[in-house]
Image: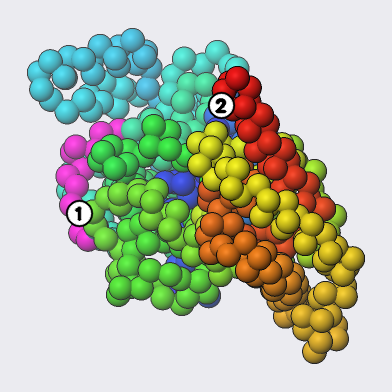
Amino acid sequence: MMVRTRYAPSPTGSLHIGNVRSGLFAYLFARHHHGTFILRIDDTDPERSSKESLEEILASLRWLGLDWDEGPPDPRYFQSNRIDRYREVLRQLLREGKAYPCYCTPEELEAKRKQAEREKRKPVYDGKCRNLPFDPELPLPERGGERRYAIRFRTPQQGETVVDDLVKGRAVFQNSELDDLIIFRSDGIPTYNFASVVDDIDFRITHVVRGDDHMPNTPRQIKIFEALGAKPPLFAHLPLVLGHDGKPLSKRHGATSVFAYRDAGYFPEALLNYLARLGWSYGDQEIFSKQELIEKFDFSHCGKSPGIFNPEKLLWLNFHYLKERPVAKLARELRPFIERRGYRVPDDEVWLEMVVVTLRERAKTLVEMVDFAHFYLSEDIELDPKAASKFLTPQILEPIETLARELETLEPEFETTPAVVASADAGARDQSSEWENTRAAALLKARADRVREVFERVLARFNLKLGQLAQPVRVALTGGTVSPGIFEVIAVLGIKRSVARLLNASTWIRQQLQETSERAK
């Protein structure tokens, strides 16, 4: 059997990560079996569907790397373009007596539902219109028309329906409890259960992968498959994704759409890896490449209990992928986040790569990396009052000013990027991809080594330990007490910017001295 799976989102909002997990598992199963993955757009609700939502869904799937074999932009895979096909199948069911018109009003049905609740009965349709005579050629409900009846499926009332689920195992449903569901509304719109079955038949779907909240729909759909003379696909119902409080995942648990995580600076590999492990396992392995997921995926390794969404675990995974990313690629991916924050994006690719090298062990997301890079990207550096008072003392004034003068002697060669890169790695003769991902580290080391030499001279002159000078310099350059190594910070900032900030710090110290002197008078 050639495996054919499908993912069928509705363009009524953003792509929810709990929902996209079903699409991921359908994709992995199809790819594992060298089958076909189909994207279908369930857009029969014209009031809630929108072009913007559709575009976001498609962009989200592309960003995640869930490429489909059949689907948009082919118009055949939009349910809104298949209304005539649904009407054709509906007419077939009416002619065969497997469907019938229902004239019950919404008010009548609501009253019956409430009555069943009061009597503690299951609120199933009572079959009032089931045996009424009707003309199988009666006009079908149309959108905007005046027909005041819906069409119901005539569910067999005897026997049972068995679902051998690939995840949940066997479930048995009594047909007498399934009732006659509406398959065509009075406004001419087919219901989910009906349109989905017709699509699955026409597109030859072999496996349906979805959340277990759809399990009550499955026996009803199986009966429609059988009424149309089609073999039902196999079903895999995945346990739902819950928040830490055990409730269905929602906005109160944090970002829940694919784009929300993309915009927060997460990587698609991290999100895919996390979602795959949310209800599926393969031994104790935690980190999976996309190809490994395809090779190892099978429904037999899916859990039967709900998956608990853990933002910290996802953040840990993202940190792993950030650290493993090639420096040049990471720098390119960082640029849009820098622009979004309003910073001027530097033209010097190697300089931005050096920024990345110094921060990649600290930042867990691209957004966080931009936050940490503020002192590199902006001259709007405010001194933390507590840090300044503690470290920018009169005793450090002369060492800081001396360091500034000594650093200025490095400026001519220090600012000549090509020459320093060449001296850092004389063996590099081209801009190969390997060299592209090592050039920033080479330049950073070459510059940092020269800065270290200057520091050692100043430390020796004033008989200071490194920490006694490095921390005041860190406060002067970054505004705070936490940053990458101070030699690397200066290597990235460059001589002119570093010297300017050191001199600003010395001015601050002198101002404090003057204010103290004036208060003493």
Q: Which residues are magenta?
A: 169-180
Q: Is residue 174 magenta?
A: yes
Question: Which residue shows up at 84% across the image and 80% down it?
Answer: 422
**Where does label 2 land, which residue?**
48
What type is the residue that disc 2 sits on? Arg
* Viewer-side label of 1, 2: 2
What type is the residue that disc 1 sits on? Ala
Question: Which residue shows up at 77% across the image and 51% down it?
Answer: 499
Horizontal and vertical percent position of residue 4: 50, 64
86 with respect to 239 (left or right): right
Question: Which residue shows up at 37% across the image and 13% down it?
Answer: 105
Crowding near the residue tagged with mark 1, few <14, some 14–19, many ≥20 C-alpha atoms within 10 Å? few
Outermost residue to the bottom = 427
Question: Which residue shows up at 70% across the image and 42% down it?
Answer: 506
500 with respect to 249 (left or right): right
Question: Does the image show residue 26?
Answer: no
Question: Does the image show residue 490?
Answer: yes
**Where does label 1 land, which residue?**
171
Q: Residue 191 falls in which quadrant of the image?
A: top left
- 191 or 45, nearer to the observer: 45
